[in-house]
Amino acid sequence: MKRILVTRFSAMGDVAMVASVLREFQEQHADVEIIMVSRAFFAPFFEGIPRILFHPIYPDKQHKGIIGLYKLFKELRAYKPTALADLHDNIRSNILSTFFRLSGYKVQTINKGRKEKKALTRSLNKVKKQLKLTTERYGDVLRSLGYTLELTHQLRNEPVALPKNIQTLFVGGKRFLGIAPFAQHPYKVFALERMEEVIAGLSDDNIQILVFGGGKKEKEIVDEWTKKYQHVFNTIGKFSLREELDIISNLDLMLSMDSSGMHMSSLAGTRSLSIWGATHPYAGFIGYGQSNDDCIQVEHPNRPSSVYGNKPCNCDGIEAIDLVTVEMIIVKVKKTIFTL
């Protein structure tokens, strides 16, 4: 049994994309075992994938700094791996990879395409074209280790059992829409007051809305929405990550930002409409198996301004994501969810 170490420490959506790729890789290579190294919180993404062992990294505790990473190296070396696939290429993963290289292990690192992404996001002489998908970049690392890999880029929806405390919500005669309105970076977020207008326009007898993602502050916002609109359910703080994936697998459709909500939908096999502003699908971060036709966006010469949504994108005095209207979203959601 060959054994590959795979490292991707963050962010949430990126780790979810790794899981989608590794699921197909393991289906094509029955003689390979994978040791997935990531933050403990992300372990549920890899449950159910054959021959994957999850090894958590604790970068703020025992694996902090060079000494901590050397401890991690010794932990991982005990698995007697045949190679290491670095799908992150950040300071931590590079240090860890160096330890393995110096010990004679075969190591391959992702090519993030930084030069092409810089050309895509710069303000002058922007080169606006579709770049290689991040999931294919992950695949390239595994291919460079000598393995074949054909990625289908297809959603596979297999609804699983719902958590008991939500089963009564899923009754017949309705369409079930997930909404993930939050994101890590502000320029990815559709203004919450306008998102509430979207919810108001969709909250009718035929659509049950479930809102995902966020912490205490976000939970309070969504709690207010549930008081105003009858068919809105707040999942925040009520379910584990594993349970959230299980719920998403039973949805008809997800509406998300360019964020982890889209990537969790891909992992659960659920179609996702996504809203884009400062970022753009051209950068390669669309959810695995999702379609560019399901990206809600308004093209503008200044888009995109960044890969991650951490920089503003001024489009003739309007932030890029504000070019998207409430009506555009409502029409797209209704057209999609009632034709599934």
Image: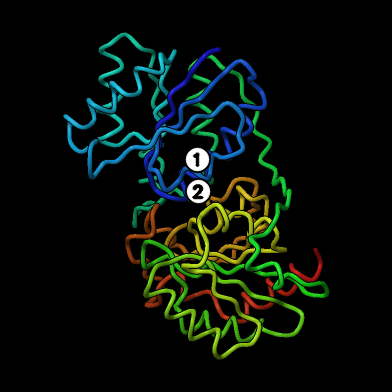
The crowd level at tag 1 (other Cα within 10 Å; few <14, some 14-19, many 20+) is many
123 to the left or right of 138: left
Q: Secondary structure at mark 2?
A: loop
85 over 202 or under it: above or below: above
Q: Secondary structure at mark 1?
A: helix
The residue at the far front in this view is 164
55 over 265 or under it: above or below: above
Mark 1–mark 2 distance (CA, rounded to whole Å): 6 Å
131 to the left or right of 329: left
Q: Which of these two is toward me, 333 or 25?
A: 25
The crowd level at tag 2 (other Cα within 10 Å; few <14, some 14-19, many 20+) is many
The residue at the far bottom in this view is 228
What residue sits right under mark 1 in the picture?
134
296 to the left or right of 194: right
Looking at the rendered structure, the kind of residue marked 1 is: Thr
Looking at the rendered structure, the kind of residue marked 2 is: Phe
Which picture quadrant has residue 211?
Answer: bottom right
Q: Which of these two is toward me, 244 or 315?
A: 244
What residue sits right under mark 2 in the picture?
285
Which residue corresponds to the image point at 53% horizontal and 83% vertical from the top-left? 196
Which circle's residue, 1 or 2, is located before the other in the chain? 1
Which residue corresponds to the image point at 33% horizontal and 60% vertical from the top-left? 310
Quick check: marks 1 and 2 in contact, CB under 8 Å? yes
Q: Position of residue 260 (x, y in %)?
A: 49, 55
